[in-house]
Amino acid sequence: MRVYISADIEGVAGVTSWDETYPGRDGYEEARDRMNREVAAACRGAIAAGADEIVVKDGHETALNLKPEAMPRGVKLLRGWGQSILGMMLGVDRGFDCAFFVGYHSEASSPLSPLSHTSEFDIYQEVYINGEKTAEMDINAMSAAMYNVPLALVTGDKGICLKASDKYPWVKTAAVKEGIGGATLSLHPDDACELIEKSAREAVEERKFKCAPIPEKLVLELVYKNHVKARAASLYPGAVAVDGCTVRYEAKSLEDMLRAYNFMS
């Protein structure tokens, strides 16, 4: 059993402010420690259920947040960015039985997290695929499915876990905090890790996971916070400016959409 884990920080228990998510700012080291602990808990759960290989992709900011020594022995860690259209899913094309998303968060403009965003919080007001508000989880689940890797577990804020349960009903979820306006109500870090480890173990043991569906038609719509960035994005071949801040792109395939999405960021 080979398990791939994509990890983020905004959905980690206790993480509430943007400062906590940036290296060198107040609260980052504490948030980083909890991120490491939650990822390690997911690894332990998978190992307990029989996983014999685990690859973890650090998917936040510098992609240098996870510490190799914080992971269980045998876990392989992918740090840094690989200049790939797969982004947070770098390496998922190497063949895995399932994928976990740990520390994930609600989509851009969602009121369910003070840290809600999709890909770049300072660039996008909202991201849509086929008219549906899109989270990083959705893009990454399709990226995994492109290589026949099913989604098995999502951990993070309550908002993203509710979305996962609704859109991918076979997925195990572990909500470790709840957004209340600009605040968060979180589990104790030890309780969060215990819940994640249990959910990861059950996800692998039950093996009910499936690949996320990839629609035949893919229309990407990006609503920028800044009209200058929107204008620049509209110059991408095939992109169309809908209004001053909105750009639409009709993709020929998921790979084509991912490439456009990366370049228009």
Image (cartoon, rainbow, N blue to C red):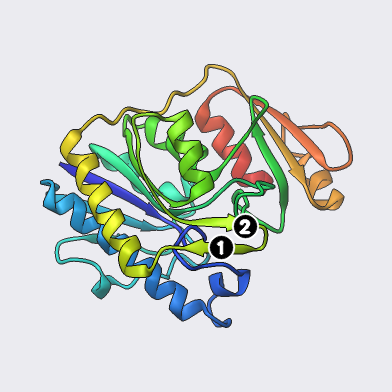
Q: Residues within 10 Å of mark 1 (few under 14, many from 20)?
A: many
Label placed on residue 180: 2
The residue lying at 50 percent from left, 32 percent from top is 255
- Quarter holding the N terminus is top left
Given residues 61 and 8, the one toward you in this image is: 8
Q: CA distance from mark 1 to mark 2?
A: 6 Å
- In the rendering, at what x and y percent does residue 104 appear? 47, 52
* Residue type pointed to by label 1: Thr
- In the rendering, at what x and y percent does residue 250 appear? 67, 24
Disc 1 secondary structure class:
strand
Residue at mark 1: 184
* Residue type pointed to by label 2: Ile
For the view shown, which residue lies furthest in the right direction? 244
Q: Residues within 10 Å of mark 2 (few under 14, many from 20)?
A: few
The residue lying at 32 percent from left, 33 percent from top is 150
The residue lying at 89 percent from left, 41 percent from top is 244
